[in-house]
């Protein structure tokens, strides 16, 4: 793939993500307005009035729209990362190895020491954020949104003053043996799990830190996550991390192109 076509391809995906995010913010503002009106009527004692019922309907419609936008962000964000990897592959003069997606890129680089190749520079710029993004946009999206292997209760968590929006998926089954499994995990992961109040919070923590789970334990961990369900981080943090990772890719691509153009 020629570099020019790869740049155009990435630009289109950046525009798609930008369109979805701007729409999300517009709907959030509309939701804030509706909520303020509902609170105002409630304070005046106007309950179960036709106006209040119309606002209730508007609120439910806006929340449903936000949920669709969050799902769209996860899907198109994952597409963007895949095409960023293709862009790097197009400009990589050393051709350290053909890449087959963002998850494959992270897996390939995880155990390699830092060097001066563009792949290494991108990975080591902020590998922790890259893995977090992959776990949410890749693992969570695949297992709970696009290719679920069982029925889940799906919803969106709306925080106080709408400062938080999360996707939430819950399964309804018993999950024995989690504590015995958790004992086998690395100390820092056990510490994070100890702070969680519910099994759902624990599986959400496992989801976000899958790359820290030893390979021999990851399959069992994934089974627990699927069996219980999980929720995403606040969508604002997901977008922040996506922008950060995309920026790292594009910065290193510019550096690589400048290096080969230099006399």
Image (cartoon, rainbow, N blue to C red):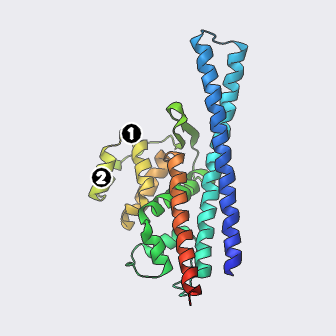
Q: In the rendered image, which quarter contains the C terminus?
A: bottom right
Residue 238: percent from left, percent from top: 52, 52
Disc with the residue nearer the chain's start (1 vs 2): 2
- Number of residue marks: 2
Residue 119: percent from left, percent from top: 49, 77
Relative to residue 53, is residue 85 depicted above or below? below
Quarter of the rendering containing residue 48: top right
Residue depicted at x 29% and y 59%? 186
Q: In terms of secondary structure, where does tag 2 sit?
A: helix
Label 1, residues with CA under 10 Å away: few <14, some 14-19, many ≥20: few
- Is residue 254 shown left or right of residue 208? right
Is label 1 in contact with label 2 (beta carbons under 8 Å)? no
Label 2, residues with CA under 10 Å away: few <14, some 14-19, many ≥20: some
Residue depicted at x 50% and y 45%? 234
Q: Nearer the viewer, residue 13 or 82?
A: 13
Relative to residue 202, is residue 187 depicted above or below? below
* Alpha carbons under labels 1 and 2: distance apart: 14 Å
Q: Nearer the viewer, residue 61 or 218?
A: 61
Q: In terms of secondary structure, where does tag 1 sit?
A: loop
Which residue matches tag 2?
190
Whether residue 1 is visible: no
- Is residue 121 shown left or right of residue 90? left
Q: Nearer the viewer, residue 143 or 244?
A: 244
Q: In the rendered image, which quarter contains the N terminus?
A: bottom right
Residue 104: percent from left, percent from top: 52, 72
Relative to residue 223, is residue 60 depicted above or below? above
Which residue matches tag 1?
198
């Amino acid at each position: 793939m020629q570099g020019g076509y790869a740049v155009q391809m990435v630009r289109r995906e950046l525009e798609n993500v930008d369109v979805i995010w701007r729409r999300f913010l517009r709907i959030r503002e509309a939701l804030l307005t509706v909520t303020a009106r509902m609170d105002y009527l409630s304070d005046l004692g106007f309950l179960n009035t036709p106006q209040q019922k119309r606002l209730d309907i508007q609120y439910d419609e806006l929340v449903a729209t936000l949920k669709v936008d969050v799902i769209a962000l996860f899907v198109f964000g994952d597409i963007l990362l895949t095409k960023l990897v293709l862009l790097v592959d197009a400009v990589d003069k050393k051709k350290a190895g053909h890449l087959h997606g963002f998850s494959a890129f992270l897996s390939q680089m995880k155990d390699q020491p830092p060097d001066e190749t563009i792949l290494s520079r991108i990975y080591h710029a902020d590998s922790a954020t890259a893995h977090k993004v992959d776990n949410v946009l890749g693992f969570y999206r695949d297992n709970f949104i696009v290719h679920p292997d069982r029925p889940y209760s799906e919803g969106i968590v709306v925080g106080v003053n709408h400062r938080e929006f999360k996707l939430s998926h819950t399964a309804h089954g018993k999950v024995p043996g989690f504590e015995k499994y958790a004992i086998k995990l690395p100390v820092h992961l056990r510490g994070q799990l100890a702070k969680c109040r519910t099994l759902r919070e624990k599986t959400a923590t496992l989801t976000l830190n899958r790359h820290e789970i030893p390979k021999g334990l990851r399959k069992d961990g994934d089974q627990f996550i699927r069996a219980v369900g999980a929720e995403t981080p606040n969508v604002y943090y997901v977008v922040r991390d996506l922008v950060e990772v995309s920026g790292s890719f594009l910065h290193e691509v510019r550096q690589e192109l400048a290096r080969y153009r230099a006399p």
